[in-house]
Amino acid sequence: MKLDRRFLLRGSCQGALAVMGLPFLDCFLDSKGKALAATGRPLPTRFNTFFFGCGLTKQLWIPKVGGKDYEMTVQLKPLEKFRSKLNVFSGLRVPLDDNPNYQHWSGVAAAATGISPTKQSEFDSKSIDQQIADVISHGARFKSVSASAAGDPKQSYSSLGGANTLPAEASPLSLYTRLFGPGFQDPTKGDWKPDPQALIQQSVLSAVADNRKRVMQNLGAADRARMDQYFTSVREAELQMIAQQQRPEIQAKVTIPDAPAEAVCNNALPNLRAVVPMMAKLGALALATDQTRVFNLSVSEPGSQIFMPGDSLGYHQSTHEEPIDPVLGYQPRVAQYNVDTMELFAMLLKELDGIPEGDGTILDHSLVFAFTDQSFAKIHAVDGLPIFVAGGASGRMKAGFHVAGDSSPVSRVGLTIQKAMGVSLDVWGKGSMEVRQPYTDLLA
Amino acid sequence: MRSFAASLLSLTLLSGAMIAGAEAASSSQVVSMRRLTQAEYRNSIADVFGKEIEIRGSFEPTIRVGGLQAASTAVLSVTPVGFESFTNMADSIAVQVTGEKYRSKLACAPKDTKEADDACTGQILSHYGRLLYRRPLGKDELKTAVNLSRDLAKKQKDFYAGLRYGLASLLQAPDFVFRMETAVPAGNKQWALDPYSRATRLSYLMWNSSPDAQLLEAAEKGELNTAAGLGKQVDRLMASPRLDSGMRAFFTDMLQLDTFDTVSKDSILYPKWSSGIAASAREETLRTAIDLALHENGDMRDLMTTRKTFLNRNLAADYQLPFQFKGDWVPYEFAPDSGRSGILTQASMLTMFSHPGRSSPTKRGVAVMDIFLCEPTPAPPANVDFSVVNDVNGALKTVRERLMAHATNSTCASCHNHSDPIGLSLEGFDTIAQRRTAENGQLIDLSASIQGKKFVGSDGLGKFLHDNPKYTSCLARKAYAYSRGENSEDVPAAAFKTANKAFTDSGFRMRAMLKAMVEDKDYFSAPAPTPETKNGATKVAAQ
């Protein structure tokens, strides 16, 4: 890892030196430039994903030049405010090797696992957010939380592998209830105390887990794996109860709002515009109060069924059926939907960047991985998949770049992200997407 | 009051018989493990503890495998998010059951409510445990739960608090949230389901709930292993009005009515559409299917052609009919010239398989092929230009013309020639199932030709399916796969031959098919464990 003076100045490591009086080397190794909580312990770096279907329009989103001084394109315009905290990746390859191009799926799986999928709608490994959660979520109440703004619990790209998708909360109210409903002890309040119930529930869970050996007997191989997953889930519930007995260390000054009203959650764009900020805000608050360190938000399924009322085709049908305008050279209605989804992405960034915390914002202490299913949805193309990474990972990630078409496999972004998130790994992805070289220039 | 020791003793004796449980482990094999669906869970809790128990929580979604969600319950596990919900629901149910209002229903009361009472706890937990696990609890299983109750009762100086947690531990155990089917040797190197697994499969199929006391008793006595005993229980289950619940669950799954959960319509183009209509449309189809299959014991082919249905105010508005009836739901018969033909033209099927703002002959055709003919359509090739299909301002005015244009491409044609005629014959109905004769000012042509047979409109499609043996055989195949949690595409025709024959011989009566299916000599047989699975089991046991 390259260490320069600027990094030291920018990171809060210096704060640690001053406050904690740690020897320089200890500080560097232990805190890695992270912001510190009031107790002096580093705040965790959080991870988010943002999923949007149907990609973007090549002519309208890819800047002509790479590096820091790229020009703002029409489709990146909604993200302009976050330019200095955003990396844009163009020209990434998605080699599928011997597997078919599963429409509206191969790209999703490649981005999220670095593996060309062997089945429609199934991941061949844990998704990246779960791989990261395994490392960073210890001590948080929820290992990860997912939300679907379109109101479909199946619109989650957070997976334990195979068909075992972690369902998404499908309305702002259900997201709120899970995060801040029963069982939530508000760490922003002075009178925080552990819930005595958590301790008791922990012993119940431990009794349930005691049956493991007996239950695992006499199962066939596939069912044994499923039962193993069940007991892993029991274990996670136990960890949740343990986490609830410790006051989360937080630095952001936030207050938990009252529960939101029921909202209509579906694919209609006006509803999404109302729901995305609500969910993004709740997610940001959950990160700020350390209820979770991994938050996933999706605005559509792959093959986005988003529609503007009055447009009888909608987004996905338009990508396939709208003719390419001979003068413009692209599909104008599709292009509008592309911009609409970038606006939804900007709403998430706005909420994450809107909560100050230590030397920056939640966004500065996070990474946000935004990905999609197709590069050119009209023909289900995957090469050139648009990928964005926002946030500074508490100083571990440099931002503000357009990483222009170097034909790296898309998995190189996943590897880089995990390096920035502190996951210890040297290689990520499989087959032609197996990569060993992260974007070292981006890693601070 | 029986003593705790006595109940333990009787359990031990029972498990000496061929029941599933910890003690029978060496010569048994779990052959199927199905995660309870939301409806199965809710019905089971209502049957075990009573309808007054409130269940609040979310359930993990299922997926469709071979056209059925039931098949996915045998491959999906419980994720941490799903378990979090199970554990919360378990505690909330246990709180209610041990609450003051409910206590009088419990089998015993403690000597002192401020103290632990193992005997009473054991009695209560073995009673509910047997109903929840659908078999008697093993000795260790009961002991674990009783110990937990005792520890927590002592700590809190409250018998019922302790009982709450012991009960909650059973309610979130894998033995409850999964329906386990256990096979035992059945002689001649054959394996078959043990009696409790038979009871469980029958009960969830027929009533969509856990076995009741009578069925468990029949299992305990070994009656389900004799043709006469089995027949008696099957007749009892089928004579009950609760058969409606079982078959509603089947038709909901087979007709993919859960699709409604994510259907939205364009509020500008179709302002009339509402969630009320959606819920009513789903109910209309279920009422039609249940009435024909169970109440009328009718010919299931008529599901494709009947003009008889059930309407409420919401649906009357959608179908553009005056609603001058009293009450909520009323039987109704569409006029002969209405173009309505069975459930094919009901609001459910027509709206589920359409886009928010327009009908989709392809979606409808693909759905009909998959649901009624068991012919799933492969995914279209990845690199296809569909632009011509859309250009409504161009020369091609109707969907038919646009579809025909792109079906001239040979790679597309192989599938579209299959599904499109079906969908095109339904074009007389828009995306919210209202009748229409023109699209973009052009008269709609409803003629279709499939497998050399020509027909016109929904009536023609209804008759085509009514007379197609593939439809009735598909129904039998799906019922068989549904009841066993298998992928319908992988089920060999021989497996449901008896059911299909009884179906045909009876003039396509659902009841006759069901009875023949579950009474078939091979229905409860299971594959012998392979050495691989046995080795694996040993390894786990040795850990």
Image: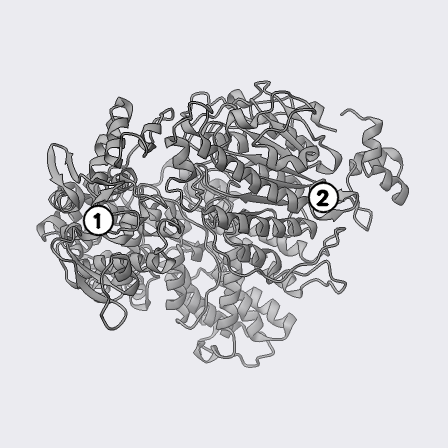
Q: Which kind of residue does numbered mark 1 sit on?
A: Leu
Chain letter for the residue marked with disc 1 in the picture: B
Q: Nearer the viewer, residue B277 or A199?
A: B277
Q: Give the residue at x 57% y 81%.
A: B112
Q: Nearer the viewer, residue A333 or B482?
A: A333
Q: Which kind of residue does numbered mark 2 sit on?
A: Pro
Q: Give the residue at x 48% y 46%.
A: A269
Q: Where residue B337 appears, x then y in whole percent? A: 12, 53
Q: Give the residue at x 61% y 52%.
A: A282
**Is the same chain shared between marks 2 and 1?**
no
Q: Where residue B122 appears, x then y in whole percent? A: 49, 70
Q: Which mark is residue A255?
A: none
Q: Which mark is residue B344?
A: 1
Q: Which residue is labeled 2 in the image?
A: A44
Chain letter for the residue marked with disc 2 in the picture: A
Q: Would you say B134 lies left or right of B482 here? A: right
Residue A222 sits above or below residue A414 on the image: below
Asked whether residue A226 is in view, the answer is yes
Mark 2 touches mark 1? (CB < 8 Å)? no
- Where is residue B6, by image quadrant? bottom left
Secondary structure under tag 2 reads loop
Q: Where residue B46 appears, x then y in whole percent? A: 39, 67
Count neighbours of disc 1 (C-alpha within 10 A) and say few if under 14, some if 14 to 19, many if 20 or more. Answer: many
Q: Where residue B444 appears, x then y in whole percent? A: 20, 40
Q: Tell me the mark number nearer the camera, choosing from 2 and 1.
A: 1
